[in-house]
Image (cartoon, grey):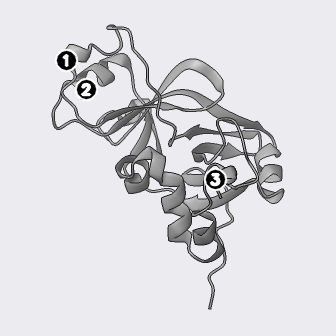
């Protein structure tokens, strides 16, 4: 018996772009939904690595001891804004829990301490975010732009970003696994 696809948009859900999205930041994107309510939704693209030189006030590269720090293009809105997605439960008054062991938030002091700790938390510095107005994300889902899957800490932090889209589709099985094998450039097919 085939299982029904996951179809509930809520905080802690992955939005996995369908092959219908062919360009832009949402091409083969995996978005972590961080908030979803009747007024709208926001999330972070977590599988688009970003190469940036950050000011020393944010990250002094000479003090970087934590091997678990990554930089991501979080989305097309306010790309100069940085958000911290991490695995630390030490600053619960500053964070929003997104799913088990995954938190959003924190200040510059938390970041400075986390990057200098060799055993520090896993962190994604996300620049920008994705946002939807009331009902917009539901319409996109119903129009076939997104597949949904519950998010997990392991997928967010342990799968290489360039492999996450394919990995999630493969794990979903059936027709989704087949889609995971479509080449990025269809002219190579």
Label 1 CA crowd tier, 10 Å (few <14, some 14–19, many 20+): few
Instruction: Determine the image quadrant of residue 105.
Output: top left
Distance from label 3 to label 2 (Cα)?
41 Å
Residue extending furthest toward the front: 188
41 to 14, vertically: above or below:
above
Work out whether mark 3 precedes mark 1 in sequence or the reverse, and give the earlier one.
1
Which is more N-terminal, label 2 or label 3? 2
At x 37%, y 33%, the residue is 70
CA neighbours of label 2 inside 10 A, class few (<14), some (14 to 19), many (20+): many
Q: Position of residue 178 (x, y in %)?
A: 61, 70
> Circle 2 — which element?
helix
Q: Which mark is residue 4?
A: none
To which quarter of the image does residue 182 belong?
bottom right
Quarter of the image containing the C terminus? bottom right
Taking the image as shown, residue 3 lies to the left or right of residue 139, namely: left
Residue nearest the viewer, comparing 53 with 113: 53
- Mark 2–mark 1 distance (CA, rounded to whole Å): 7 Å
Q: Which residue is mark 1?
A: 63
- Classify 10 Å Cα crowding around label 3: few (below 14), some (14-19), many (20 and above): few
Seen in the image, is 133 located left or right of residue 152? right
In x, y percent, where is residue 166?
52, 58
Q: Earlier in the sequence, mark 2 or mark 1?
A: 1
Residue ID for mark 3: 188
Q: Position of residue 81 (x, y in %)?
A: 54, 19
Left or right, residue 92 beside residue 81 = left
Q: Which residue is mark 2?
A: 115
Q: Nearer the viewer, residue 35 or 75?
A: 75
Depth check: give the residue in front, 75 or 181.
Answer: 181
- Which residue ends up furthest to the bottom in the rendered image? 1
Image-quadrant location for residue 34: top right
Comparing labels 3 and 1, the label whose residue is closer to the camera = 3
């Amino acid at each position: 018996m085939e299982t029904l696809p996951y179809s509930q948009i809520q905080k802690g859900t992955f939005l996995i772009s369908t092959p219908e999205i062919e360009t832009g930041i949402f091409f083969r994107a995996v978005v972590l939904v961080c908030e979803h309510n009747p007024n709208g939704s926001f999330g972070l693209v977590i599988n688009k690595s970003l190469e940036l030189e950050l000011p020393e006030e944010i990250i002094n590269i000479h003090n970087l001891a934590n091997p678990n720090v990554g930089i991501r293009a979080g989305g097309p809105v306010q790309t100069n804004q940085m958000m911290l997605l991490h695995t630390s439960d030490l600053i619960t008054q500053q964070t929003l829990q997104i799913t088990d062991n995954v938190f959003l938030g924190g200040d510059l002091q938390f970041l400075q301490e986390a990057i200098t700790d060799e055993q520090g938390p896993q962190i994604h510095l996300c620049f920008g975010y994705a946002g939807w107005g009331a009902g917009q994300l539901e319409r996109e889902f119903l129009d076939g732009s997104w597949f949904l899957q519950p998010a997990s800490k392991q997928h967010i932090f342990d799968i290489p970003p360039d492999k996450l889209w394919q990995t999630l589709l493969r794990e979903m099985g059936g027709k989704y696994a087949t889609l995971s094998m479509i080449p990025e450039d269809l002219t190579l097919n």
